[in-house]
Image: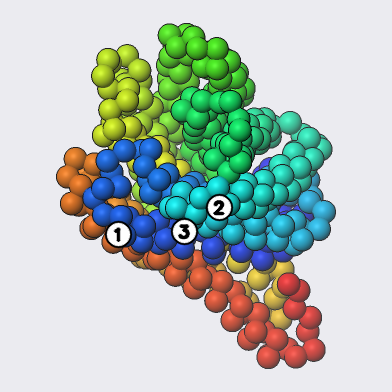
Amino acid sequence: MNPPGLSYDQAPPFNVPLRFFLTAPWFLVLAAALLLWEGPGIVASRWLPATLAFTHLIVLGFMAQVMLGALAQILPVVVGVSIAYPCWIATLIHVPLTLGTLALTGAFLGGGPVGFQIAAGLLGFSFSVALITFHQALWRAPIITETVIALRCALGALLVTVALGLLLSSYFGWGGFNLSPLPLTNLHAAWGLIGWTALLVAGVAYQVIPMFQITPLYPAWLSGGFAPLVIALLIIETVLTLNGWAWAATATGTALAVALIAFAVRTLVLLHQRRRKISDPALLYWRISLICLATGAAGWLATRWTPGWAHAPAVELLLGILLIVGFPVAVINGMLYKIVPFLAWFHLQAQLLGRAKPPHIKQLLPETPLRRQGWVLLITLLLLLTAICYPILIYPAALALSMTGGWLGINLWRVAYKYRYALARAALDHPHGRVLE
C-alpha cells in the first residue's frame, strides 16, 4: 500500500532519476580536487575565478543534478502527473547539464569567452527542457496542495535564476551588454539559493518530514504562506536593487532572512517532536542542514545592519559555505540516502513480483555507512569554515570533501549494483519471466 498522498503507479523508470543521482557526488570530488589544486589562495575572495568555479561545481554539478532528477520522480509520485517520454527528457536534461557544468568550470578557470558561450548554450538547453517539462506537469496537478504551491514557486524562481545566469554568461561570452555584473550576480545567487533551493526543500519537507519521521504537520500558515511570501519578497528586492534603492532592498532582505529562519526553526521543532523513536541516520543530515540555514540567514542579517561586514571577504565566504555546503548539500545528501534505496526496493517489488523476494531497504543500503558519512560531512563543513580564518586548513578540508563525495557516490553505486544483481539473479532463476526496466 502506498503512503497517503503518494501515487507510485505513475512513477517513471528507475533509470530516469538514477542517472542524475549517480553523477552528482563526483562533482563534489571535482570541487575537492579544485581546492587542492588552488590551495589557500582560493579563500581570499568569493569573486576569484577559482572560487566561482568551485561554487558552480557544487550548485550545478551536485545540487542541480539531484534536484532536477528528484523532480522527475516527485512530480508523478507526489503531484500525480506523468511526464511524457521520461527517459528521453531525462537524457536531454542530464547530458547537457553535465557537459555545461564542466564547460562553465573551464571558462572560469581560463577558458575565455568561448567557454562561457559553450556553457550558456548547453546549460540554456538543459534548463529550458527541464523548465518547460516540469512547468507543464505542475500546472496540470489535479489537487493544489502546499507542496504543489511550493514547487510552482521554486520552478518560477529557477526560471529567474537561469535567466540571470545566462545573461551573465552572455556578458562574459560575447560582451557588448551595458550591465553591472555585481548586483546581477547577487540577485542570481538570491533567486537560486532562496527561491529555487529553499522552496524546493520546503516543498519536499512538507511531505517527507511528517510522513517518514512521524511528526505533527507543519502549521497551515507556514506551509501555505512561506513559498508565496518568499517569491513576493524576492520580486520586491529585485526591483528595489535594480533601481538602486539600497536601504529598502536591505529591509526586504531582512524579511526574507526572518522567513528562512522561521522555516528552519519550525522544522527543527517538528523533528524534536517526532513520535518515531527508532533511530534514523537521515536526522543528522536534516539537522546539519537546518542549523546551517538558520545560522547563515542570521549571519546575513548581521551583515546587512553592521557597517563594514557586508563586503568583508571572510564574512562573505563563511556565509557562502553555510548556505551552499551546509544547507543544501547536507539535506540533499540525506535525502539521497532515503530516495535511492527506496526506489530500488520499490521497482524490484514490481519487477520481481511472483518470481523472487526483493532485498529489503536496509539490505540495499545499511545504516552504518550512512551514519559514518554523515559525520565526515560535518567534519568537512567545520574544516571549510575554519579554513576561512586559517587558509592552510584548505588542504584537509579538500580531502574531507573528496571523501564525502566519493563515499556518497560509492554508497549509491552499491545500491544500483544490488538492484541490477537482483534483476539478473531473477532472470537466471526464471529465464522465461519478463524483467521490466
Q: Residue at x 68, y 54 (%)?
A: 93
What label sits on residue 62 in the rendered view? none
Quadrant location of residue 225? top right
Q: Can you say whether 366 is above or below 36 in the image? A: below
The color scheme shown is: rainbow
Mark 1 crowd level (few <14, some 14–19, many ≥20, 10 Å Cα): some
Quadrant location of residue 396? bottom left
| Total numbered circles | 3
Q: Amino acid at mark 3?
A: Phe
Q: Which residue is mark 3?
A: 27
Which comes sooner in the sequence, label 1 or label 2?
1
Q: Amino acid at mark 2?
A: Gly
* Quadrant location of the C terminus in the rendered image: bottom right
What label sits on residue 115 in the rendered view? 2
In this rendering, position of residue 400 left or right of residue 18? left
Q: Report if residue 203 is visible in the image.
A: no
* Quadrant location of the N terminus in the rendered image: bottom right
Do the residues bearing badges 3 and 2 touch, measured as CB atoms within 8 Å? no
Secondary-structure class at tag 2: helix
Q: Which residue is mark 1?
A: 36
Kindly report which numbered mark, 1 or 2, lies closer to the viewer in this rendering: 2
Mark 3 crowd level (few <14, some 14–19, many ≥20, 10 Å Cα): many
Secondary-structure class at tag 3: helix
Q: Position of residue 319 (x, y in %)?
A: 34, 34
Q: Can you say whether 421 is above or below 217 in the image? A: below
Q: Position of residue 216 (x, y in %)?
A: 50, 33
